[in-house]
Image (spheres, helix red, strand yellow):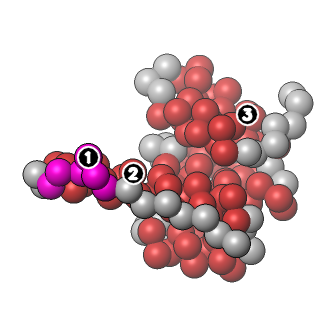
């Protein structure tokens, strides 16, 4: 399988594939992530692990190399909260692009929570650009 460079669009596509109810989509995403994993993609992999909607067992089965990397950084605690995710991304010196994508994804998640609680978010906008 050809290696994929983990740019924003590819990561978002992989995230959607992982969330799909069609198991063949998630299995293909696991294969792509596993075969394309490199030092340069560590931040994106943490992001995919957090937002994939897949269990640790599925990661271990379908992407063992990636799972072992993530497991090493989780240090026995599978709770990947936003602050913990940022800490891990900082520790591994994740790219600015992966941190920006995490913040964008987290902000969209936060917006969804706010809407569920009845807050109006039409005018809610947050732009994050790391320099």
Q: In this image, 1 relative to 68: left or right? A: right
Membership of 122 in magenta stretch: yes
- Indicate the quadrant containing the C terminus: top left, top right, bottom left or bottom right: bottom right
Front residue of 46/120: it is 120
Of labels 3 and 2, the one closer to you: 2
Query: What residue sits 48% from the left and 53% below the top?
Result: 105
- Pick whichever, 96 or 91, lies toward us: 96
Q: Earlier in the sequence, mark 3 or mark 1?
A: 3
Residue 54 placement, left or right of 40: left
- The nearer-to-camera label among 2 and 1 is 1
Q: Residue 77 placed where, x, y %? A: 49, 72
Does the magenta segment cover residue 103? no
Do callouts 3 and 2 mark residues in contact (Cβ within 8 Å)? Answer: no
Q: Position of residue 103 (x, y in %)?
A: 51, 62
Image position, residue 63 (x, y; %): 70, 44
Instruction: Calculate the distance from the C-alpha at mark 2 to the C-alpha at mark 1.
Output: 12 Å
First in residue order: circle 3 vs circle 2: 3
Task: Report the residue marked by disc 2.
Answer: 108
Q: Tag on residue 31?
A: 3
| Prevailing secondary structure class for the magenta stretch in the rendered image | loop
Viewer-nearest residue: 114 or 32: 114
Which residue is the extreme one toward the front?
Answer: 123
Q: Is residue 68 visible?
A: no
* Magenta-highlighted residues: 119-124
Which residue is rendered at x = 74% and y = 74% of the image?
Answer: 93
Q: Which residue is mark 1?
A: 122
Placement of 86 over or under 117, stated as above or below? below
Q: Which SS class for mark 3?
A: helix
Checking the image for residue 76, the label placed there is none
- Mark 3 vs mark 1, foreground winner is 1
């Amino acid at each position: 399988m050809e290696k994929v460079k983990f740019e924003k669009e590819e990561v978002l596509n992989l995230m959607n594939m992982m969330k799909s109810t069609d198991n063949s989509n998630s299995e293909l995403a696991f294969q792509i992530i596993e075969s394309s994993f490199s030092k340069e993609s560590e931040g994106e992999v943490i992001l995919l692990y957090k937002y994939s909607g897949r269990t640790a067992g599925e990661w271990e089965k379908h992407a063992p190399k990636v799972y072992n990397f993530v497991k090493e950084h989780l240090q026995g605690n599978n709770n990947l909260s936003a602050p913990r995710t940022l800490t891990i991304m900082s520790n591994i010196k994740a790219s600015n692009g992966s941190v920006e994508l995490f913040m964008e994804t987290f902000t969209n998640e936060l917006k969804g929570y706010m809407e569920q609680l009845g807050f109006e978010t039409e005018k809610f906008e947050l732009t994050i650009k790391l320099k």
